[in-house]
Amino acid sequence: MKRGKKYKEAAKLIDRTVQYDVAEAIALVKKAATAKFDETVELHIRTGCDGRHADQQIRGAVVLPNGTGKTVRVLVFAKGPKADEAQAAGADFVGAEELVPKIQNEGWLDFDVVIATPDMMGVVGRLGRVLGPKGLMPNPKTGTVTMDVAKAVQEVKAGKIEYRLDKTNIIHCPIGKASFTEEKLQENFDALMAAIMKAKPSAVKGAFLRSVTLTSTMGPGVKLNPVKVAQ
């Protein structure tokens, strides 16, 4: 893979053979984020889980204390008073059956998170083929299928993120922007790691955290010490 000049310069700051402490890693990631836009700082965790087994799945959500730095567009499937509550809480789009053809036939996907009341899941289920592969299907485990739509909307807007295993048993999550202070990134990192450690399946054999890497959108990865992170 051909790397640009900026990436090569940034890579010189990082010793690939070293596993850094969190504070050092955050400082390095910020220093290496030299793109013209405000890069997202991402956490990538290779786990010892085997996602093929139901008892080794990980999926949940956590509110980052300092948010993600991203404006999140929220779509809520609800009717009547619940639709009014969602609107009042700041949902960007609220609707019911009438949204199905818009998403299915017109390819409308101008939203980042979908929340639904339980009674609307029959309608949302018809969109499974579109929303599922994009990771947008509402799920009770992440608090996006709920009667308390107002709280769900407020949490998402405040910086609630979802974490889950991908097909290769890795968790990828944003923890903020490169413009955040080191303290804010550290607080977000700690909140996310605490949630993931709490969600560790008891069926996992051997090391739960195989590797932990912090990176910015365009920057090189910085390895962390998994043993220290897990403490």
Image (cartoon, rainbow, N blue to C red):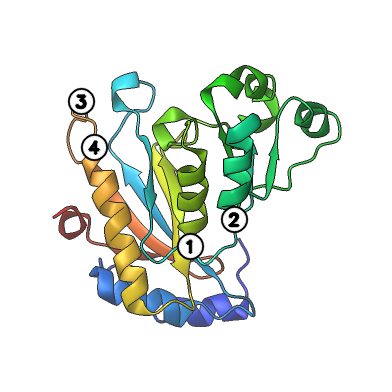
Asked if the residue at tag 2 contacts the one at tag 3, i.e. Cβ–Cβ closer than 8 Å, the answer is no
Tell me how far mark 3 sits from mark 1, CA to CA.
31 Å
Picture coordinates of residue 231 (x, y %)?
A: 13, 55
Q: Relative to the observer, which residue lies in front, 72 or 130?
A: 72
Asked if the residue at tag 2 contacts the one at tag 4, i.e. Cβ–Cβ closer than 8 Å, the answer is no
Secondary structure beneath dot 2 equals: loop
Residue, disc 2: 72
Q: Residue furthest left?
A: 231
Q: Classify residue 201 by image quadrant.
A: top left
**Labels 3, 1: front one:** 1
Residue, disc 3: 203
Tell me how far mark 1 sits from mark 2, CA to CA.
9 Å
Residue, disc 1: 68
The answer to whether residue 151 is above or below residue 1 is above
**Labels 4, 1: front one:** 1
Secondary structure beneath dot 4 equals: loop
